[in-house]
C-alpha cells in the first residue's frame, strides 16, 4: 500500500467516526483531538476501524502513536511493511 492509499484509509476511518473532519484542512502534524472534537470513545472507534479496514492488530500501548495523521502514516507504514 502506498502513502496515498494509506492516507485515504486513515482519513476514511477518521471521518467514519468524526464526520466533521475536513480532509483538505487536516494538519498532519497536529493531533486529531487538537483539531476536532474527538473524544476518547471516538478515538477508540477510529483505532478499531483502522484495525478492521487494514487487517492489523494495534496494541493499546501504541494508540498514542496514532494521534495525528503523520503519526498514523509512520506507525501504520511500519506495521504494514511499507
Image (spheres, rainbow, N blue to C red):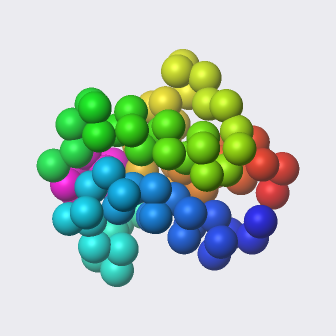
| Residue 7 picture location, percent across and down | 56, 67
Residue 29 visible in the displayed image: no
The answer to whether one can see residue 71 in this image is: yes
Total count of labels: 0
Q: Which residue is drawn at 46% across and 56% down?
A: 13
x and y percentages locating residue 81 in the rendered image: 84, 50
The one nearer the camera, 28 or 50, is 50
Residue 51, x across and y down, in percent:
60, 40
**Horizontal relation, residue 25 to residue 44: left or right:** left
State left or right for residue 57 relative to residue 23: right
Residue placed furthest toward the top: 61
Q: Who is closer to the viewer here, 63 or 12?
A: 12
**Which quadrant: the N terminus?**
bottom right
Decide whether residue 35 is among the magenta residues. yes
Instruction: Pick the residue in front: 34 or 22.
Output: 22
- The residue lying furthest to the right in this view is 81
Span of residues in magenta: 29-36
Amino acid at each position: 500500500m502506498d502513502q496515498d492509499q494509506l492516507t485515504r484509509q486513515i482519513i476514511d476511518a477518521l471521518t467514519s467516526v468524526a464526520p466533521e473532519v475536513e480532509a483538505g484542512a487536516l494538519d498532519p502534524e497536529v493531533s486529531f483531538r487538537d483539531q476536532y472534537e474527538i473524544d476518547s470513545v471516538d478515538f477508540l472507534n477510529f483505532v478499531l476501524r483502522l484495525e478492521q479496514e487494514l487487517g492489523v492488530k494495534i496494541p493499546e500501548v501504541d494508540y498514542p502513536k496514532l494521534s495525528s495523521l503523520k503519526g498514523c502514516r509512520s506507525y501504520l507504514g511500519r506495521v504494514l511493511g511499507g
